[in-house]
Image (cartoon, helix red, strand yellow):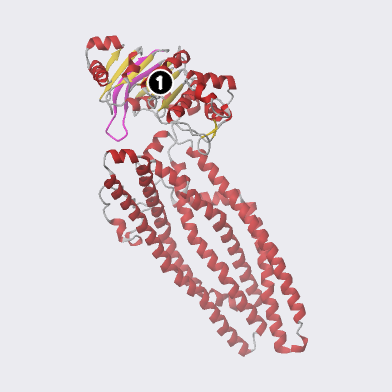
Amino acid sequence: MKGKPVSEDHLPPSAFRSPPPNTARIPTDFGFERSSSRLPIASVQTVNKELVALISKHKRGFFLVAALQFVTVASALVIPRTFGNLLGQLGKNPQKANISLTVTIVATALVVQTIFSYWTKVKASVLGEFVLSSLRERFLERVVELPPNVVERAGSGELLSRTTTDIDHITWAVRDAFPIITISLVEIASIFIAIAFTAPIFIAVVMIGAPVIFAVTRRYLRKSPQAYRVESSSYALMNSVLVESAESGRTIDALRLGEDRIERSDSALGRWIEWERYTLRLRTAWFPFVEMSYIFPLGVVLLVGAYFYNLGTMTIAQITASLLYAQMAIDPLEGMLWWIDELQGGKASLSRLLGIHEIQEREIRISEPDGFEVRGEEIRYGYKKDRDVLNGISFIIEPGTRVAIVGPSGAGKSTLGKLLAGIQPPRSGTVTVGGSEVGYLPVEQTRGHVALVTQEHHIFVGTLRENISLANADATDEEIWEALVAVDAHLWARELVAGLETPVGIGGTRLLPPQAQQVALARLVLADPHTLILDEATSLLDQRSARHLEASLNSVLEGRTVIAIAHRLQSAHDADIIAVIEDGKISEWGSHAALMKADGPYATLWKSWRDES
């Protein structure tokens, strides 16, 4: 599905300038943001369909809010009619005018209006929270299901922006805009009904500004949704640049890239400010016409009322009530239009949120692996079209074999590890475990057979027990401690104040990077897969600690297939098989002794590493 392009007269001239050097391109196709480094944005049709679905799902809540608001407005409409009748009586026969009754009716109407207005706002807020809860839960469920390669291509700032800023915009829109627009529509409809019963001619008078409101609002809504979506995208781009700069501060400083990052940040910030100003100009051109269009009818009501009063076909009571009704219509109309404008930002954020649901699902092929053999046949894979990282790799790994994958940086070692773990299937060829293509198995089934541990790990907010038992929720304390012993983490874990119940993560005990890596390995022990893939799994430990940990893991890994992407060649020395990858191909395959005797690429790597050590 492709979004409808926007004509050039709908965009500021800056939208067509070439992007400054070293900056990412801001999209000009507003329907979708189809970039290899960005997540998609849902189309207007998808967003509208989702809004209709949400309203249908919570229709009882909307009807209740509408009914309560109808009572609120009905009590408010009593007041103008009562004052109109009082003025009529004062004009005809002042002695018979009952001011006390008028005050009593008005006071009663105000009390009823206050009670039901409060009740309406409470129910509207509750409704907004339920709608927001549905959106948030659905979004989070989808986020955790996203393939890791999709998240990596999108960048941390893009997903962070959608899970924070866009959620906040939607929260405001759902919690405030939807209820207030619903209330305003009911109030306007009720006022027009009251005018129809008082003096039908004034319906046409009050509607005199409607064509202007319709025209300028239509023009505004024709431009604003696209502009708001690009504004959100430019904000996400700016956020991404800032987050990446903050996270990579040491690298930037070491490589003296400070000026380049400042230039990128300034450019991204400038783009966002430019679009922010453009949407502000749209609002500035819209609001004055709207203001005049619903104030002008008040004067027309007075002129028309005076004309018909002179003809004797209309009373003072009718004119007064109609004038007050017209005055009452201004607030809900103004509020509705104002919140419709605010809703544009919410819809833009919603389109970014719903875009995650339009990411293509992984193809699933249900099968049950028969055995533990790992096999690759003519594997080809690349991150860019027509540019493969792996070029026709084939191999067979027997169950229980320890394999070390070595090679120069950028040769494709980590890419092969991801394919073996089933994170994604190869572009062509097959990667199978027990005869089943691991890249097409359901994630839960895959993790029961193959597990991947990298140098990237995360400590979740919770207790140490909860962090480790993520891999096996039914694990006992004894099993958790056995896992900690297996990864050499039991000593520091026993020193924690509350042991396994110690809160860790943000707000709790801060674990050092090596300790966090040990927690990740303890999860792996509890997961108990038959094939383990370790990609720099001990990189944060010093060489002596890493050797001690690997020795401790030997008993746990006994009988399992272990595929280690080795950056320390000492780890490769102890492997049964060493696979040397160069330029996306396996150039050597054999034991340490055999490869040293062959005096090929591995022997060169080993000698170079040994001399540096």
| The N terminus - image quarter | top left
Going by the image, does 268 lie left or right of 371?
Answer: left
Tell whether position 219 is magenta.
no
Across and down, in percent, residue 358 comes to 44, 42
Closer to us: 147 or 161: 161
Closer to us: 580 or 55: 580
Across and down, in percent, residue 166 comes to 47, 49
Q: How many marks?
A: 1
Label 1 sits on residue: 545
Q: Which three-letter amino acid code belongs to the residue tagged 1? A: Ser
Q: Indicate whether 33 appears above or below 309.
A: above
Across and down, in percent, residue 55 comes to 58, 52
Closer to us: 419 or 367: 419
Q: Is residue 557 visible?
A: yes
Q: Residue at x 32, y 52 (%)?
A: 266
Going by the image, does 118 lie left or right of 610?
Answer: right
Q: Which residues are magenta?
A: 374-398
Going by the image, does 380 lie left or right of 440?
Answer: left
Q: Residue at x 45, y 12 (%)?
A: 558
Looking at the rendering, which quadrant does residue 576 occupy?
A: top left
Going by the image, does 526 lie left or right of 395?
Answer: right
Looking at the rendering, which quadrant does residue 206 occupy?
A: bottom right
Main SS of residues in magenta? strand
Across and down, in percent, residue 228 comes to 42, 56
Q: Say which element carries label 1.
A: helix
Tell whether position 375 is magenta.
yes
Q: Residue at x 45, y 16 (%)?
A: 552
Q: Residue at x 29, y 56 (%)?
A: 16
| The C terminus - image quarter | top left
